[in-house]
Amino acid sequence: MGNALLAAVTADANVLAAWEVSRNRLPDEPVPREEVAAFTANLLENLRGISTVLRDRSWVPGPLRVATIPKSDGSERVLHIPPLVDRVAERAISAVLTHRIDPYLQPDSYGFRPGLGVDDAVGALRDRVADGDRWVIRTDFADCFSTIPVAECLAELARVVGEDDVLELVCRAARRRVGPVPGRGVAQGSPLSPLLVNLYLDQFDRAGWDAGISIIRYVDDLAVATGSRTEARRQLSVLRSAAQRFGLKLSADKTHIVDAREGVEYLGRVVRASARTVAPLADPGRATLHVTRRGAALRASGNKFVITGGGVNFKHPAARTRMIVCGDRVLLTSAALGLAARSGVGVVIVDPYHEHSIFLSTDTGRHDVQRAQYAAETDPARRHELAAAIVRGKIANSRVLLTRTKARRERIDPDAAARLHRLRAHSAAATTIAGLLGIEGAASRVYFHALGQLLGPEWKFTGRRRRPPRDPVNAMLSYGYTVLAAEARRAVELAGLDPTRGFLHTAHRRRPSLALDLMEEFRALLVDTAVLRLIALGAVTPTGFTLTGAGCRMDQPTKRALIEELERRMLTRVVHPVRKQPMHYRQCLEEQAQLLARALVTPGLDYNPMPWR
């Protein structure tokens, strides 16, 4: 990994891009003209020199120059500016590490992140105020850049990227003293500092999230929307304690609780409460693109993905893309795959006939989390405990789907729900993984038989059949489960876990066993519910399917309807039962992966599947 990261940093194209960014920002940065003239006089030689000293790790950052710029309140901001040659070197490092680190950051961190900015942060606050949370905490960190604990900041970086040659280069830059207290402070004015500050403050964001506080953060500027003044005061007290725990302090003169009916100033904008609106779906943020038409092509143009074929020419920014799901016989260009890799976008190639997918992604594993994962996998007692929780969660949510309405309860066998309840209870007595799998299999047979009773006879669904699916309902389930497995794999990777090492599902070649574990509790909640809803609404009919030798195939309108319904379900907002925070189901999937990771690294902490309320 170390060599790969260093090679990416020192690549000629990356160093050249770092110079171009630095050059474009020269009008706004206080760099002496003579320094610029000296650097550009031998530009190619200097750029090659930067690449060389980074590659052989002989780079020694030069001294920082102190400069001041005026702030909007009339005061001055003190900057510590590296020499131009070091600014280019730091930007080359930062460009690579940003794509490595960005997937770990909380979704409501908006500063210095690809594709995000002030508009997104203000929009997030505006949405929460519109949802009725009009009491807003406004605060920031006092002297944030100059008080960040450097050693702890670098330790957090090491946990994410591992012991790496690039880490050594970052350490040299970060250890230049900038504050009055030794060991504290990163240079505000260094291209590396925003990345380091974001990574360190992400721990604060997560501490808030663990306490049920949803923080909107733009670098060191914070906003938290709550439902009452009392709750705002309570959350502010928690935030002060969390800041102290991380060696930071909230600014006393910039900390206020504001009624949004009077207007809240945030990042130079004013957000006001208006009539409350309730949206059934959450903003997807980074979208999942589906490319299903045979003969379509996924290409790249600059920093955008381009989908062509069948008269379509659709463009979407990579920075606003989280995953791309491609059907069979879709052309993927090397440019598109390269853009996906650079942007941290997962690419999934779906084979719905065999409930199988190929997943292309960048490595986001965390060494501390994966060590704990491997230890749990090889500890029979711990593995059994986790596998049993997965089985209990799946059976419980399957039972909820069957009994959620009176009409459903009247249509299924009277003892189906009771049998599922007994099987869930029996899972606690199982002593082996094989025993748990037997219980899970028995529960699935009961469940799918009852599911067939909820459908009309025209669907001819008598039970789960796959590899290949032989009827329309199985075709929709197989496709939906394949997409869900890809979503679960993405969630697992973002949590720093190894998707191939599961607890209920054993490791087998490169099968995403842990993703299959995670998706179990979501099968009925997401995919099965989507299929039932499509059938109930008449949005799909048996005439939209063709039985071939390779299995049952959906026509394009049917597949489009299924994808749209799956996405609608993924973006449906609910209150997470543990976090007590509103989020859409895709975020719930990611949150469950995070909870699993925390359970693995925290002795005595249990993993609890997400119950369907």
Image (spheres, rainbow, N blue to C red):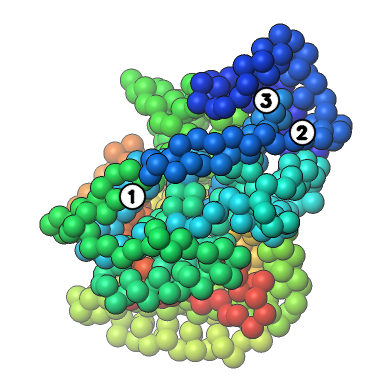
Q: Is residue 275 left or right of residue 118?
A: left
Q: Is residue 68 left or right of residue 304?
A: right
Q: Is residue 517 visible?
A: no
Residue hosting label 3: 84
Instruction: Calculate the distance from the C-alpha at mark 3 to the C-alpha at mark 2.
Output: 10 Å
Proximity of marks 1 and 2: CB atoms separated by less than 8 Å: no
Q: Is residue 164 left or right of residue 427?
A: right
Proximity of marks 3 and 1: CB atoms separated by less than 8 Å: no
Q: Earlier in the sequence, mark 3 or mark 2?
A: 2
Compared with residue 329, is residue 562 higher up or lower down, i.e. above or below?
below
* Kind of residue at badge 3: Leu
Say few, some or many: other residues with alpha carbon within 10 Å of mark 1 (under 14 / 14 to 19 / 20 or more).
Answer: some
Residue hosting label 1: 266
* Kind of residue at badge 2: Gly
Using the rendered view, name the quadrant where residue 560 is placed.
top left
Image coords of residue 339 (percent x, y): 56, 30
Q: If the image is split into quadrants, where does the C terminus sit?
A: bottom left
Residue hosting label 2: 62
**Mark 2 residue element:** loop
Residue lying at 63% horizontally and 21% vertically, measured from the top left: 32
Image coords of residue 502 (percent x, y): 65, 65
